[in-house]
Image (spheres, rainbow, N blue to C red):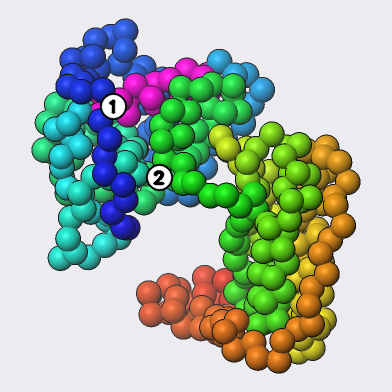
Amino acid sequence: MRPGRPVTNTREAIVARGRAARGDTAPSSEFWRLVALGHGRCDADALVPLQLAFDQPSERPARAFARDFARAVEALNTPAHAAQLVRDESEPLDSPLLPMSDDVFLSARCAVIAAGREEWERVVADPAALSGRWRVADGELFFAVVHDIALDAGENALDELAASLAQPDDSWLGGGGGHDVGVPVPAAYRWAELELGEALAASDAWRAWWSASGRGRLDLLPFVSPDVSDVVRLRRRRCSYELAMTIDSAGMHGEDPQRLADLAVAHLRVQIEAVRERLHLPPTPPWPELPPVPDDLSCFEGEDPVTPEEVGEALAELGMGQEFIDSVVRATRWS
């Protein structure tokens, strides 16, 4: 976790503790019941029950939850709270505490909320209690999930906070993604993926095409795996869309550089087409042609993929039972 921008207190001398104590502005009991579904945590797994709770057509509960979340965050928005120093729970005990930047301050407050009503009330009443170790990195995810819930319900209570954290980026296309255990990402594939992505991002014709989406940016988050899934998720953010989908890893073990480059192009086309279909966008502009694959791809070489056997060895060192280890190894083995 790194320090970010300095905190900007746009409203001086906010006495949030007094406001939070009043019944008309305090988060509701139903809000805290839903927060408790995470059992004090806000990592991806712990947030699943909360997401499922709002996987329904009714918008009123989601809007109410988002507004309560905004109240809970605001109650911790005082100069005294912002002056505290925090550390993520994943960091060593001897690592330095971080001063509050905008993003760290918001994530820390979200982590306090995730810890539950009693912990939140304690920190509201005593700003010094915020100093120390929290699930700060998970708090960032917590905010993103709740903001998505709000957006899906047409609620803008968190938009101002989200906008304050938005990082300026002129590119309309970005992303990341990952690959399954045992699946390599060859250098020629990496080269083509980056080369084509940069060509699309720099193209005025493609930028104009994407402008029909109504969002400034598209982030592609593929997961390359032999276990292909039909599930495609297109998440709407305040200023962007995020596509998450599984890409078939067949062919990733090849050695021909040109075929691997062509495979990267095909995978990117699949993702763009999935977005186009779901947003009902017009046909895409002509695709850029890649230059020949360079002979020297050393700068695109990645680490060797983790093997199922290495996964098994790591689980054994953690004291896991052999039956469990065998089941995990079978599930991750590339055949």
Q: Residue at x 60, y 57 (%)?
A: 175
Mark 1 residue crowding within 10 angstroms, few (<14) / some (14–19) / many (20+): few
Question: Where does the N terminus fall, quadrant-wise?
Answer: bottom left
Q: Is residue 23 above or below residue 9?
A: above
Mark 2 residue crowding within 10 angstroms, few (<14) / some (14–19) / many (20+): many
Which of the two discs, 1 and 2, labels the residue nearer the N terminus? Answer: 1
Q: Secondary structure at mark 2?
A: helix
Residue wearing tag 1: 10
Q: Main secondary structure of the magenta part?
A: helix
**The quarter of the displayed image where residue 257 is located:** bottom right
Residue sitting nearer the eye, 290 or 265: 290
Q: Is residue 163 above or below residue 98?
A: above
Q: Amino acid at mark 1?
A: Thr
Task: Point out the stretch of residues depicted in magenta.
Answer: 61-77
Q: Residue at x 76, y 36 (%)?
A: 212
Q: Is residue 109 above or below residue 229?
A: above
Residue sitting nearer the eye, 87 or 300: 300
**Residue 74 highlighted magenta (yes or no):** yes
Residue wearing tag 2: 140
**Residue 250 highlighted magenta (yes or no):** no
Please say whether residue 335 is visible from this viewpoint.
no
Q: Secondary structure at mark 1?
A: loop
Residue 45 drawn at (x, y percent):
48, 49
Is 108 on the left or on the right of 204, as rendered? Answer: left
Residue 21 drawn at (x, y percent):
21, 14
**The quarter of the displayed image where residue 105 is located:** top left
